Amino acid sequence: MGKIARIKPVKLIAGFIYRQDHPLKKAEGMLLKKFGQFDFKSKPIPFDMTDYYREEFGTGLRRVFVSFRKLINPASISRVKNITNNIEAKLSFKSKRSVNIDPGYLDLAKVLLASTKDYSHRVYLDKGVFAEVTLSFKGNSFTPNQWTYPDFKKEEYINIFNAIREIYRNQI
């Protein structure tokens, strides 16, 4: 029988998909109030691997990733996802979002994303939220899994998560 170990805190991350800067700034401000300061923020990256958000957001989308200085209990990620969904709703106009927020967490072994959508590779957590291990750390870098979204397979994204992992490694 295995012993139940104390769970280590993890690094809260969020990815934003947006077209205009103003909703991004508002969403960032709301997250800062809830979860504290960022210790990493990526430069904007063109979000051009899919047309999934075109009808809702239009074209010319960008993505930014952040990580938060304060570490969290991994069990709290379903609560975080519900908070980000509420922020998206508050910043919506005529039932269309102005920003998409994808929260998750990172530890030394993985990048996990929270989702409200079930699928064969996702595990139900709580409060309508599922979890997906999007990237796994192997050798000296994060690597995609079979189901990883195409944009998360890009070297630019993997470099971002490797940089955040180094921040986290130094914290713990």
Image (cartoon, grey):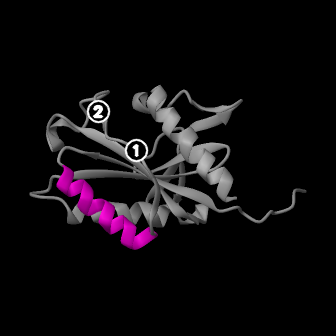
Q: Nearer the viewer, residue 18 or 150?
A: 18
Kindly report the secondary structure that dominates the magenta region of the rendered protein.
helix
Residue 67, disc: none
Amino acid, disc 2? Pro
Are the residues flagged by discs 1 and 2 in contact, CB closer than 8 Å? Answer: no
Name the residue at the left extreme.
94
**Residue name at image x 61 percent, y 65 percent:** 73
Residue at left 52%, top 34%?
159
The residue that appears at 53% across and 54% down in the rendered structure is 124
Image x and y of residue 136, in percent? 62, 36
SS state under label 2: strand
Q: Amino acid at mark 1?
A: Ser
**Relative depth, front residue between 21 and 134:** 21
Q: Quadrant of residue 44?
A: top left
Q: Is residue 133 visible?
A: no
Mark drawn on residue 46 = 2
Q: Quadrant of the N terminus?
A: bottom right
Q: On the rendered structure, is 12 left or right of 108?
A: left
Q: Which residues are magenta?
A: 21-35
Left or right of 62 in this view: 152: right
Q: Is residue 116 left or right of residue 17?
A: right
Q: Is residue 146 magenta?
A: no
Locate residue 81: give its quadrant: bottom left
